[in-house]
Image: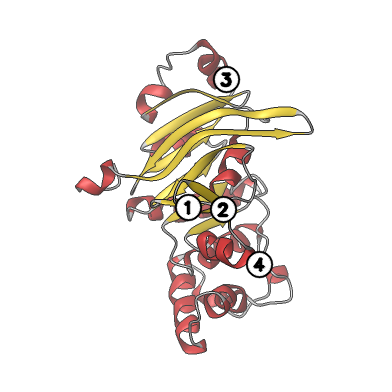
Amino acid sequence: MSVTSEENTQAIVSLHGIRKSFRGTEVLHGISLEIHRGETVCLIGPSGSGKSTLLRCINHLEVPDDGLVTVDGSVIGYRLSGDTLFELGKRELAAQRASMGMVFQNFNLFPHLTARENIVHAPRHVLGLSPAEADARAEQLMARVGLAHKLDAYPDKLSGGQQQRVAIARALAMRPKVMLFDEPTSALDPEMVQEVLSVIKDLAREGMTLVVVTHEMRFAADVADRVVFMDDGRVVEEGPPERLLKAPAHDRTRTFLSKVST
């Protein structure tokens, strides 16, 4: 496991009966799942199985039709008053989301801002850091992802792998409790995949809580504390990678893994 203290038995993310439909088609069928503090969980499964939708429900980018998500004890998207839940306004929801870093498939950097400016924007405007504090954080994080020499480069001057590492640094600048990765290497050329995965591996080794949607089975085998296999909007099975990836209990998992490189 990434951490060895008693904290790793505590669920920092809890999903309770999450259901989600699009245009009348249910894509998540009442999923319940817990992610422990300091744990790295990889979500795997075929395209259309609901992995990315589930990830987006964690930070309320997708609003569940039913069920609740809690992160570090707070119900995401709502305020509890007595026995009643009240939907949060945009400002309160933004404050909640600040505790969860999200890295998408397609980088989503501001093209008119340098790497430094991309990173300092949210810490200054959301966290209220001074320009000097935000700048120091940007320099530290760019060094952490191996791009100290690219601080003042614009996104169009960076490779895809470099842009994704800047996106990771930008998410880390908010000092999140949880990092969410939605297939972070799927838009990259093969030679750039490892430079991004190595950064995520470092975060896992440091004990950060990670939830990663991935099609990289070898990465899941190397990094995950737990692998969750999804199909048709349901959790089919979950377990440590050495068991699930090598000796899955369910036929559907075996069929899926037989068609992908492990």
Answer yes or no: is residue 223 visible: no
Amino acid on which the number 1 mark rests in the picture: Leu
At horizontal 40% and vertical 43% (from top left) the residue drawn is 40
> Front-most of 197 and 44?
44
Disc 2: which residue: 86
Residue 80, labelled with which disc? 1
Q: Residues within 10 Å of mark 3 (few under 14, many from 20)?
A: some
Q: How many callouts does the rendering have? A: 4
**From mark 3 to mark 4, how far is it between C-alphas?**
35 Å
The mark found on residue 256 in the picture is: 3
Asked whether the residues under the numbered discs 2 and 3 touch, taking CB atoms below 8 Å apart as contact, a structural biologist would say no
Mark before the other along the chain sequence, 2 or 3: 2
> Separation of disc 3 and disc 1 at Cα?
41 Å
Q: Is residue 233 visible?
A: yes
Q: Position of residue 48 (x, y in %)?
A: 68, 30
Q: Amino acid at mark 2?
A: Phe
Q: Is residue 139 placed above or below 48 in the rendered structure?
A: below
Task: Work out which residue is located at the far right of the displayed protein and give it.
Answer: 23
Q: Position of residue 92 (x, y in %)?
A: 56, 64
Residue at image location 27% in from the left, 45% down from the top: 8
- N-terminal of the two: label 1 or label 2? 1
Residue that carries the numbered disc 4 in the rendered image? 158
Please say if the residues under marks 1 and 2 sit with CB atoms less than 8 Å apart: yes
| Mark 1 vs mark 4: in front | 1
> Taking 38 as reference, is 110 above or below it?
below
Q: Nearer the viewer, mark 3 or mark 1?
A: 1
Which of label 2 and label 3 is nearer to you?
Answer: 2
